[in-house]
Amino acid sequence: MEQKNYNPYVSAQSQFDSVADMIGLEQAARDLLRQPSREFHVTIPVKMDDGTTKIFNGYRIHHNDARGPAKGGIRFHPEETADTVRALSMWMTWKCAVVDIPLGGGKGGIICDPRTMSLGEQERLCRGYIRQLSKVMGPVIDVPAPDVMSNAQHMLWMLDEYETITGGHYPGGITGKPVGMGGSLGRTEATGYGVIYTLREALRVNNIDIKSTTASIQGFGNVAEYAARLYTELGGKLIAISCWDNDNKKAYTYRCLDGIDVDRVASIKDKFGTINKQKALDMGLELLDGSEWIAQDVDILLPCALENQITPETLEKVSDTVKIICEGANGPTTPDSDDIIKAKNIYLVPDFLCNAGGVTCSYFEQVQCNMNYFWPKEEVFEKLDFKMTTAFHAVHNLAQEKNLYMRDAAYMIAIDRVANACKLRGWL
């Protein structure tokens, strides 16, 4: 099916503009908040294993830091763009605000494919990125974290380079580090668990028993895997998983109408979230086209992969059985799809609320690093559940009170908090 190309930054600005109109946001605040406050575009020379030098392009973008240091992950992706990073930095501002943690929004990206690079090349790339940006990052300025195809080891190499340059120890300067090296227990599970904490509350307010539900999920990376694990542990039945197959350069959907054993499927995926196709078939899973995850007769759709996956075109395939969409990915739904979702009477948990578990746990990691005292995993999950549940009900209650779409209610809360911080600082 031919689909329109969507620019995520244009989508992020469109969502902002719509809510700014609803709340009558003053022009100065609009002009300040609809674009990043600063951008850094860098070139990174890396000595490759074959002796050649390759130049990589990278970005670090701060959207707004009125509520605290910029916070956001660093993506490694061959198709990364400045506009994607701009959009994600903006969403990070709203994400931190809606769960009410004292951080602003930032994001980073490097145009690369770590799947084709040795560990040595990846390390040199990480250190080169920090050498370019060390003056504009750190625990009181900008705190990076892992994102798409970056991981805890990458973060530790970056922190080591930052500490080498600055001559001190700053464990709170980068989050998502390995446990035992300043990382928080529970960080691996946090984003996926946060998705299901909000789903659990969405089901409760809609008087639906999670044990009676079925779901289909897009993605099987870190977020999707742990969302799938907790959803099935709570009694839900997962019948379909769609993920990218790097060997075949296409996506597949794996389906089992009796319910997928998440542990078994997780045991046959690689570190980038690709499920081994042959082993999946040997398990008895049905193989479908990658786009078929959205067409399943389920109660819940969990887009936990990439942006711009739910569009007017793909919504034509959505079953009338779908009651809830929980946006585990950043920007999975295009702005021109929201009216269709409303018309279908589907309850939506918006991305910057739904997937805020990761940044919330990253904030917990900063707090623990600053105290030099680390909590047990159960305490991390308890605090995470409290934060996500409190944020969900604030958004839901506003949506009910003012008869708003959930995305609009979440934006209203987030924009109001950030705009108020800018006013109190005297920026507006």
Image: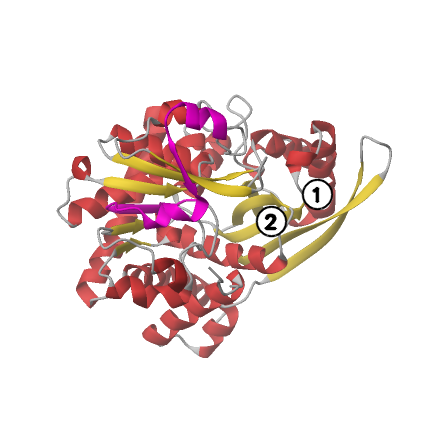
Q: Where is residue 182 in the image (x, y as percent from the top left)?
A: 53, 27
Q: Where is residue 362 in the image (x, y as percent from the top left)?
A: 46, 38
Residue 99 appears anywhere in the view: no
Residue closest to the eye, 266 or 280: 280
Q: Which amino acid does label 2 sit on?
A: Gly
Contact flag, marks 1 and 2 (Cβ < 8 Å): yes
The verdict on residue 292 being magenta is: yes
Q: Where is residue 218 in the image (x, y as percent from the top left)?
A: 41, 43
The residue segment tinted magenta is 276-304
Q: Residue furthest left?
A: 207
Residue drawn where x is 34% and y is 56% of the image: 317
Q: Look at mark 1 in the image and give the residue it sits on.
A: 129
Specify which label sits upstream in the sequence, 1 or 2: 2
Q: How many badges with numbers are in the image?
A: 2
Q: Image height check: is 132 above or below 343?
A: above
Q: Image height check: is 150 above or below 110?
A: above
Q: Look at mark 2 in the image and give the residue it sits on.
A: 108
Number of residues whose C-alpha sits closer than 10 Å to that of mark 1, classed few (under 14), some (14–19) or many (20 or more): many
Q: Is mark 1 on a helix, strand or loop?
A: helix
Q: What element carries label 2?
A: strand
Q: What residue type is labelled 1?
A: Tyr
Residue closest to the eye, 95 or 254: 254
Q: Position of residue 427 (x, y in %)?
A: 51, 68
Number of residues whose C-alpha sits closer than 10 Å to that of mark 2, classed few (under 14), some (14–19) or many (20 or more): many
The verdict on residue 128 being magenta is: no
Q: Image height check: is 258 above or below 92?
A: above
In screen coordinates, is 91 left or right of 181?
A: left
Residue drawn where x is 38% and y is 41% of the image: 357
In screen coordinates, is 181 left or right of 314?
A: right
Residue drawn where x is 23% and y is 31% of the image: 234
Q: Residue furthest right?
A: 51
Disc number placed over residue 266 in the picture, else none: none
